[in-house]
Amino acid sequence: MATSEADFDWVADEHSTWQELDNAVRMHGDILRVAMIDLRTLTGKDRLKVRVIADIEQMLANLGIGHLPSELRGNQDATAVLYKLGSPAAAVIEAVRNGTSSDRLEHALRHLNTANSTSVQREYSIKKQELAEQLGILDGVAQEIRNIIKS
C-alpha cells in the first residue's frame, strides 16, 4: 500500500523554540514530519547552507531526536521525519539501517503490530457500550408503547 502525505502528522509553525519542537515530537507519538524551512527558522538563519544543516542535526541529536532522511536536505521545501531516539520507531529504523535484529527490534515490531489491534478492541468496547445504552432506551420506549396499548 502506498503512503500518502495525509498518512503523516504535519505540524507547521507550532514551535518557535527547540524545546517546543521536542514537545511536538512527543505529542505526536514520538514521530513528526516538519518542513526544512521550519527547522531552518529555529536556527535563526536565512539559508539552509551546509553549516546550518549541521547545526540542525546537532540540535536534534542534543534533544534525542533522529531524522529521516539520515542526511537532511538543503532544500527548504523538503520535509524531514523526526523521531525520538529510543522509541519503538527508532528501533525499527536502526535495524533497517544496520541490517540487524535484536530483542529491542522484536519488541518494537510487536508493539507496532499490537498497538493497532488494541485500538480496534478499545473502539469495539466503546461501540458495544453505546449499543447497550441505545438498546436500553429502545426497550424503555417499547415498554411505554406496551403500556399505552394496554390502557
Image: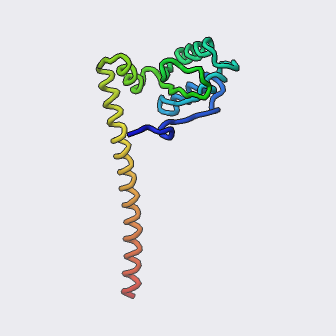
Could you tell me if residue 67 is visible in this image?
Answer: yes
Report the number of discs.
0
**Relative vertical location of residue 63 with respect to residue 13 in this rendering, above or below:** above
> Foreground residue, 52 or 44?
52
Location of the N terminus by quadrant is: top left
Could you tell me if residue 19 is visible in this image?
Answer: no
Q: Residue at the spot x=63%, y=29% of the render?
A: 15
- Colour mode of the rendering: rainbow
> Foreground residue, 38 or 28?
38
Q: Residue at the spot x=48%, y=29% of the render?
A: 31
Residue 89 is left or right of residue 81, and the answer is left
**Relative vertical location of residue 137 with respect to residue 41 in this rendering, above or below:** below
Residue 13 position in % (x across, y down): 64, 32
**Relative vertical location of residue 130 with respect to residue 25 in this rendering, above or below:** below
Q: Residue at the spot x=48%, y=22% of the render?
A: 69
> Foreground residue, 146 or 70?
70
Residue 22 is left or right of residue 115, and the answer is right
Location of the C terminus by quadrant is: bottom left
Residue 102 position in % (x across, y down): 29, 19
Q: Quadrant of residue 148?
A: bottom left
Which residue is most to the bottom?
Answer: 151
Residue 99 position in % (x across, y down): 32, 18
Residue 84 is left or right of residue 37, and the answer is left
